[in-house]
Image: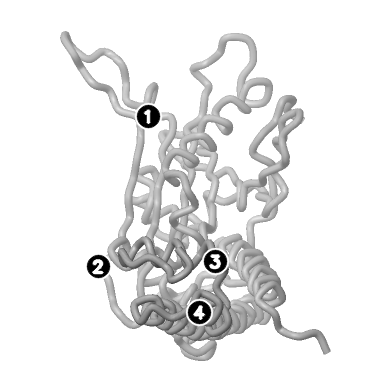
């Protein structure tokens, strides 16, 4: 039996986080969930019902974790059907000498408008770490820029820039810091008139938008249905049975065998991650307490003018470490 060292536990947590991430992507690929996100997070779809979006706006296929970001060459029921998923566009986009980074979910959505179809290109991302070391909104705009530039040769050719289609990069953070919980933030391009009369239609410059959804607690209702839906979907505290019941009753998402299976898997992974996090926190707390006690002992022995060899023996600290402690408390070691 392999001893559960810190490294072994870290590997287990990383594995479960990867499985959780994959499961989350699968859940988000269902039309019923995407339709709710489109209605709530995009102005183009806000006037339509969720059922209408499912039936009329999600026609083409989408792919999950298969379309890379970087690329040098373009290569009916009364309830929303929880069994229908979007199936996918070509999704690879890697650059020479760059490691491949994939869009979580990438799909087109079609918006009927005055007898013509307006197509938006959407990118949905699950961000488990809401402080990854860079602003998420900047990465979102980078993804938008990639989705805009990739339209050359497919959506338009030559200089027909009038055919450019708007893109969205939507980021869902299931576990943000407490101060950021339960919030939706939009970032987009606007016209800033310095002088003169405006002459450009909004559709000509409103070409990219980043949306960040910071989730909260499933047991606390918000003022927005989309937050309540995603809070329930990604909750690590409510049971699978309650989760499925609420999705069915509150958001009219019919439970199918496949969708129920994905929800159950999400609950199991959430529970595993919570338990691992608690265990890791307890272990870290014990180790921290032990270190604090050892440091306190070293400081006391230095103050009592104990011989350096004795302090080293009882604390396990090196001479260099003890000199550092002695300097901080302003008392020289006995040997010095």
In the rendered view, tell whether residue 170 sits above or below residue 187. Answer: below
Q: Which SS class for mark 2?
A: loop
Q: Which residue is mark 1?
A: 206
Going 49% across and 73% down the picture, which residue do you hit? 234
Q: Horizontal placement of 104 versus 4: left or right?
A: left
How many residues crowd mark 4 within 10 Å: few (<14), some (14–19), many (20+)? many
Going 58% across and 72% down the picture, which residue do you hit? 82
* Residue 264 location (% of width, % of height): 61, 83
Pointer 2 or 4: first along the chain: 2
- Tell me the CA gap for discs 1 and 3: 64 Å
Camera-side residue of 244 and 276: 276
Going 58% across and 31% down the picture, which residue do you hit? 146
Q: Which residue is mark 4?
A: 311
Q: Which SS class for mark 4?
A: helix
Pointer 3 or 4: first along the chain: 4
Q: Which residue is mark 3?
A: 319
On the question of residue 66 being in view, the answer is yes
- Tell me the CA gap for discs 3 and 2: 60 Å
In the rendered view, tell whether residue 167 sits above or below residue 336. Answer: above
Pointer 1 or 3: first along the chain: 1
Q: Which mark is residue 223?
A: 2
- Tell me the CA gap for discs 2 and 4: 60 Å
């Amino acid at each position: 039996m392999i001893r559960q060292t810190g490294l072994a536990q870290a590997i287990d947590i990383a594995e479960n986080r990867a499985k959780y991430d994959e499961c989350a992507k699968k859940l988000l690929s269902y039309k019923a969930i995407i339709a709710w996100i489109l209605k709530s997070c995009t102005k183009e779809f806000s006037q339509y019902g969720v059922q209408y979006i499912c039936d009329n706006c999600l026609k083409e296929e989408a792919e999950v974790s298969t379309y890379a970001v970087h690329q040098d060459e373009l290569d009916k029921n009364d309830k929303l059907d929880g069994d229908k998923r979007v199936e996918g566009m070509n999704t690879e986009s890697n650059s020479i000498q760059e490691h491949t980074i994939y869009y979580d979910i990438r799909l087109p959505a079609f918006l009927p408008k005055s007898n013509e179809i307006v197509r938006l290109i959407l990118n949905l991302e699950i961000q488990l770490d809401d402080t990854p070391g860079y602003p998420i909104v900047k990465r979102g705009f980078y993804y938008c820029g990639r989705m805009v530039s990739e339209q050359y040769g497919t959506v338009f050719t030559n200089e027909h820039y009038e055919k450019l289609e708007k893109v969205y990069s939507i980021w869902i953070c299931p576990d943000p810091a407490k101060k950021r919980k339960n919030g939706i933030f939009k970032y987009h391009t606007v016209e800033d008139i310095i002088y003169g009369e405006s002459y450009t239609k909004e559709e000509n410059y409103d070409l990219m938008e980043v949306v960040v959804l910071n989730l909260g607690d499933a047991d606390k209702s918000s003022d927005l249905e989309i937050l309540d839906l995603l809070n329930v979907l990604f909750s690590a505290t409510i049971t699978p049975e309650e989760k499925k019941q609420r999705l069915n009753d509150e958001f009219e998402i019919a439970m199918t065998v496949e969708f129920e299976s994905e929800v159950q898997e999400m609950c199991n992974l959430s529970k595993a991650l919570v338990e691992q996090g608690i265990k890791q926190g307890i272990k870290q707390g014990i180790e921290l307490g032990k270190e604090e006690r050892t440091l306190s002992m070293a400081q006391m022995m230095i103050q009592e003018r104990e011989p350096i060899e004795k302090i080293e023996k009882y604390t396990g600290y090196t001479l260099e470490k003890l000199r550092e402690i002695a300097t901080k408390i302003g008392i020289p070691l006995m040997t010095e």
